Image (tube, grey):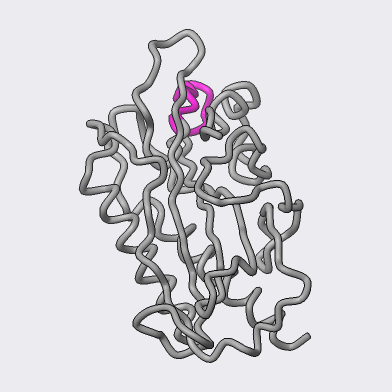
Amino acid sequence: MQFKSLAVPLCILSLTLSGCASKYVDPEQYSGFLKDYSVLKEEKSPSGGAVMRWIEPSVDVRQFTSVYVEPSQLYPKPQPTAKIPQSTLNGITQYYDQTLKNAFSSALPLASGPGPGVLVVRPAITAASAKTKGLRPYEVIPIALVAAGISAATGIRDQDTTLATEAAFLDGRNNTVVAQVVRMGAGADLDNSAQVLKANDFKAVLDVWAKDMVTSYQQLKTK
């Protein structure tokens, strides 16, 4: 299923500061990166964020003695634009990789690849194809940029930015999926529609995602 219009119509209709990034990802917005979305349920992350999540009920995470973080993907593969250049896309995935490794290394030794006793983290930054009502269609918009089109005269921000991720967690012994998560989060506000998006605009939300993943693992380990 294609990742459709991630939150753009919702944000334009609501024109609120809190609406976009706090919502659960709608099933029609799933990218197709994960193998089975039917098992996902609405949950709250350790930091209180809205997530769609599934954890294999019988999984014993204490079996994992190390973790391997696969290089994060941009899925579906986006087309860079003047607004979101390739350097920004590269910077986002590179930072996501590093922050995931930093976070998980506090709980488990890092492995160099999958294998027995290895928890495999397979992350993706998902993309969206969208158009804004009344304006020309956008190109395929990488990393689910939400262009709210809010006028500066309203006293609110010119543009909101939203990032979305999907991640699978696998048993490195047999490649069995033991958990999945889908969520979105807010990036930095842009001053105006001409501002070029940078990887730094999303570092804070990527940090939160990584921390939540590790905290969820630690909570399961203590059960």
> Which quadrant does the C terminus fall into?
bottom right
Residue 44 as seen in the image, left or right of residue 110? right
Percent x, y of residue 63? 62, 89
Residue 129 as seen in the image, left or right of residue 91? right
Name the residue nearer the viewer: 65 or 7: 65
Which residue of the protein is positioned furthest toward the front in this rendering? 174
Q: Residue at x 63, y 78 (%)?
A: 217
Residue 187 as seen in the image, left or right of residue 6? left
Which residue of the protein is positioned furthest toward the top in this rendering? 134
Q: Residue at x 25, y 32 (%)?
A: 81
Name the residue nearer the viewer: 137 or 111: 111
Percent x, y of residue 102? 41, 79
Name the residue nearer the viewer: 13 or 75: 75
Residue stretch in magenta: 147-159
How would you classify the magenta stretch by its main secondary structure?
loop
Q: Residue at x 76, y 51 (%)?
A: 42
Residue 86 placement: quadrant: top left
Q: Is residue 6 magenta?
A: no
Percent x, y of residue 80? 25, 36
Percent x, y of residue 29? 58, 35
Q: In the figure, 115 relative to 202: above or below? A: below
Q: In the figure, 201 relative to 145: above or below? A: below
Residue 18 placement: quadrant: top right
Count up the numbered dots: 0
> Which quadrant does the N terminus fall into?
top right
Q: Residue at x 50, y 48 (%)?
A: 33
Q: Is residue 153 magenta?
A: yes
